[in-house]
Amino acid sequence: MSMEGAASQAGERLTFRDGAKAGIPVAIGYIPIAVTFGLLAKSAGIPDSIGVLMSLLVFAGASQFVGVNLLAVGVSHWEIVLTTLILNLRHFLMTASLSRRIAPGTSKKWMALLSYGVTDETFSVASFRREQNLSPSFVLGLNLIAFLAWNAGTWIGLFLGAGLPQSLQASMGIALYAMFIGLLAPSLKKSRPMLVIALLAAAIHSCLKWVPLFKGLSAGWGIMIATVLAATVGAMLFPEEASA
């Protein structure tokens, strides 16, 4: 048997427990961020049921933070849906790429279930596995432990938020911006294209915010336009990065 064939069979033998074990670092990292999300949702005055459902049904950290912020500033619901859709378009590419690694013969029902739990972090863990193919049970274990940690963190955040003084709840809004800066800064140090695109997005959104011509534009549309324009210009300026 060739080395490629052996690697493929080894991946297809991976179990649910193997996946859960591989996902433990992701789960540990998710908990403090999910707690922050719960605290922010509470401080923004969003009902606990909505915060819980966002983590259960959306399960997309950055989009949930953006959604809470847009709800807090009174953006319409359809603008929030469209904004989060644009932010999550990358998941189409990630799930399409990951589907090529799932063991042949996996049913579409399995594929649909696995695609629901894919996040940036679980995709990275699965993609960097040495095995050529991965068993559905392995990916399910990886996704599920991350999903449970995120939802547990949300519950903890909502619970803690209920006990905080009103003044402290209001100050938690700064945590949103601190989290995004914390996620973005390491990537900006390593990638010049990402730095250029981030600065471009900030410049476009600043123009939409402060130029009188765009005064009537809502916050949701401002984010969507800045995201699409910056990503488009970035793909044109750095085509080799986009195709990598």
Image (spheres, rainbow, N blue to C red):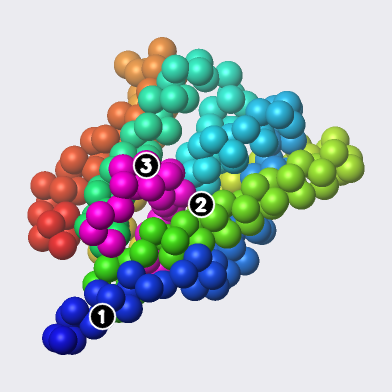
Which numbered tag is attached to residue 79?
none
Quarter of the figure that contains the N terminus: bottom left
Rate crowding at label 2 as few (under 14), some (14 to 19) or many (20 or more) other CA atoms within 10 Å: few
Quarter of the figure that contains the C terminus: bottom left
Residue at horizontal 35 percent and vertical 18 percent from the top: 214
Residue identifier under label 3: 109
Residue identifier under label 2: 180
Report the front residue among 161 and 57.
57
Report the front residue among 162 and 116.
116
Q: Quick one: SS at disc 3?
A: helix
Magenta residues, dominant SS class: helix
Name the amino acid, label 3: Lys
Looking at the picture, how far across and down is residue 2, in whole percent? 14, 86
Q: Quick one: SS at disc 2?
A: helix
The span from disc 2 to disc 3 (Cα, nearest Å) is: 34 Å
Q: Which residues are magenta?
A: 103-127
Question: Is 112 left or right of 4, judged from the image as shown?
Answer: right
Q: Are marks 2 and 3 in contact (CB under 8 Å)?
A: no
Looking at the picture, how far across and down is residue 199, in whole percent? 33, 49
Question: Is 86 left or right of 8, judged from the image as shown?
Answer: right
Residue at horizontal 10 percent and vertical 60 percent from the top: 240
Report the front residue among 192 and 239.
239
Residue identifier under label 1: 7
Residue at horizontal 58 percent and vertical 25 percent from the top: 71
Q: Disc 2 vs disc 3: which is toward the camera?
A: 3
Name the amino acid, label 1: Ala
Up/down of 207 relative to 216, above or below: below
Q: Is residue 91 visible?
A: no
Residue at horizontal 48 percent and vertical 39 percent from the top: 63
Q: Quick one: SS at disc 1?
A: helix
Image quarter for residue 222? top left
